[in-house]
Amino acid sequence: MIAVSPHAEGATLAVRAQPGAKKSAVLGEQAGALKVAVTAPPQDGRANAALVDVLAEWLGVRRSRVEVLAGATSRNKVFLVRGVSAADLAGRLQTRVGPPPEGR
């Protein structure tokens, strides 16, 4: 299950980044995080900016509402999505990624 937590300004989302990929896409769930591939290299914050773009479009929110909260230099990151409740964000994830497999 993808980790989503409430935050004073919205909700947080655990993300596993894959920079330098052939194409940018949301790949699903991996180890409790949303796996997101981006074509940008992990240099000078380019991959983080690309992740913000992909997440904002995929979640249907403005780019200004998504920011890296933790893990800026790591593959494991936490993003803040402003103006969205944790329940709403979890619902969007379930709709887009699907429910967890049975027995989990």
Image (cartoon, rainbow, N blue to C red):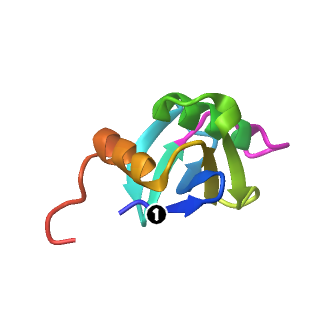
Main SS category, magenta section: loop
Q: Is residue 92 left or right of residue 63?
A: left
Residue shown at 41% from the left, 46% from the top? 88
Residue shown at 71% from the left, 61% from the top? 70
Residue type at tag 1? Ala
Q: Position of residue 56 (x, y in %)?
A: 57, 33
Q: Judge whether 92 appears above or below 76 on screen.
A: above
Q: Tag 1: Cα neighbours inside 10 Å, few (<14), some, or many (≥20)?
A: some
State which region is magenta.
37-46
Q: Position of residue 95 (x, y in %)?
A: 29, 41
Tell me the quadrant of the picture where the C terminus can be found: bottom left
Whether residue 93 is in magenta: the answer is no
Q: Position of residue 79 (x, y in %)?
A: 63, 52
* Residue closer to the observer: 2 or 60: 60
Provide the residue designation for mark 1. 3
Q: Position of residue 81 (x, y in %)?
A: 60, 45
Tell me the quadrant of the picture where the N terminus can be found: bottom left
- Tell me the SS state at disc 1: loop
